[in-house]
Image (cartoon, helix red, strand yellow):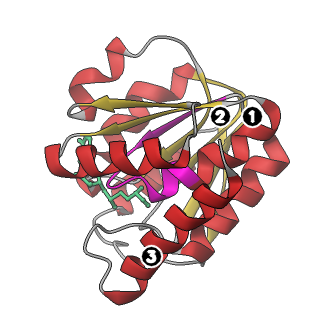
Amino acid sequence: MNKNTIEQVKTRIEQVIANSNPYWNISPETATYVVSLLNTYKPMRVLEIGTSIGYSAIRIAEALTVWDGELITIESHTERFEIAKKNIAETGLKNIQQVKGHAPEILDGIRGTFDLCFFDATKYEHLSYFNALKERLNPNGIIITDNMLSHEKELAAYKKTVEDNPQFENELIDIGTGLLVSRKL
Ligand SMILES: C[S@@+](CC[C@H](N)C(=O)[O-])C[C@H]1O[C@@H](n2cnc3c(N)ncnc32)[C@H](O)[C@@H]1O
């Protein structure tokens, strides 16, 4: 891992985000907020659904190196998966496991529990991710869900389900496209 190389890869992707964001990466501000949550909760095992070209994965994994945490990140789209692979390899980060596949079909095959999950894939599948993962989230574990404000309508049923679940306390954060931060009690 080389700090300068990580900075170079991040800066390069941030320029793409600033131009037209063709790969739908979270904004640098959103990533910084996610990193601040990571620094607070220090999760050891993080799952991301929706790698795209690896921007959030790199931001998350870089933070996790401080306490030896690891990231598993899932992407179904072949071209974006391969671009992410190159970007991640260039950073030298070794704590990212990339998984290629359609999340609802492969979640069962990824063993173990998680301390933090980041949902940033197809909006109408979030409920299925939540149902598949809520029991595999450790106590005090966090689910961060993106696009809660940009896709308020599409995610209304998801939001209601999570908010009605007494196992979770929730906070909606008005940053980027809107994050729901759900902590398991
Ligand atoms: C918003 S982008 C992710 C951006 C990334 N988290 C970042 O900020 O750098 C969403 C990605 O999720 C992927 N995706 C959508 N549905 C998926 C699924 N069911 N399983 C795996 N990946 C999925 C899409 O191909 C797309 O690349």
Q: Name the residue: 20% across, 34% down.
A: 102
Which label's residue is closer to the chain start, 3 or 1? Answer: 3
The answer to the question of whether label 3 and label 2 lie on touching residues, with beta carbons closer than 8 A, is no
> What's the CA distance linking mark 3 and mark 2?
23 Å
Q: Nearer the viewer, mark 3 or mark 1?
A: 3
Q: Name the residue: 28% across, 51% down.
A: 83
**SS at mark 2 in the image:** loop
**SS at mark 1 in the image:** loop
Residue highlighted by disc 3: 149
Q: Name the residue: 32% across, 52% down.
A: 121
155 w.r.t. 116: above or below: below
Between residue 27 and residue 66, name the one nearer to us.
66
Residue highlighted by disc 1: 185
Name the kind of residue labelled 2 in the image.
Gln
Q: Nearer the viewer, mark 3 or mark 2?
A: 3
Which label's residue is closer to the chain start, 3 or 2? Answer: 3
Between residue 2 and residue 170, name the one nearer to us.
2
Residue highlighted by disc 2: 167
Counting the numbered discs, the total is 3
Q: Which mark is residue 113?
A: none
Name the kind of residue labelled 1 in the image.
Leu
Residue 159, x across and y down, in percent: 46, 56
Instruction: Find the magenta span and give its range.
Output: 45-58
Residue 40, x across and y down, in percent: 84, 49
> What's the CA distance linking mark 3 and mark 1?
24 Å
Name the kind of residue labelled 3 in the image.
Leu
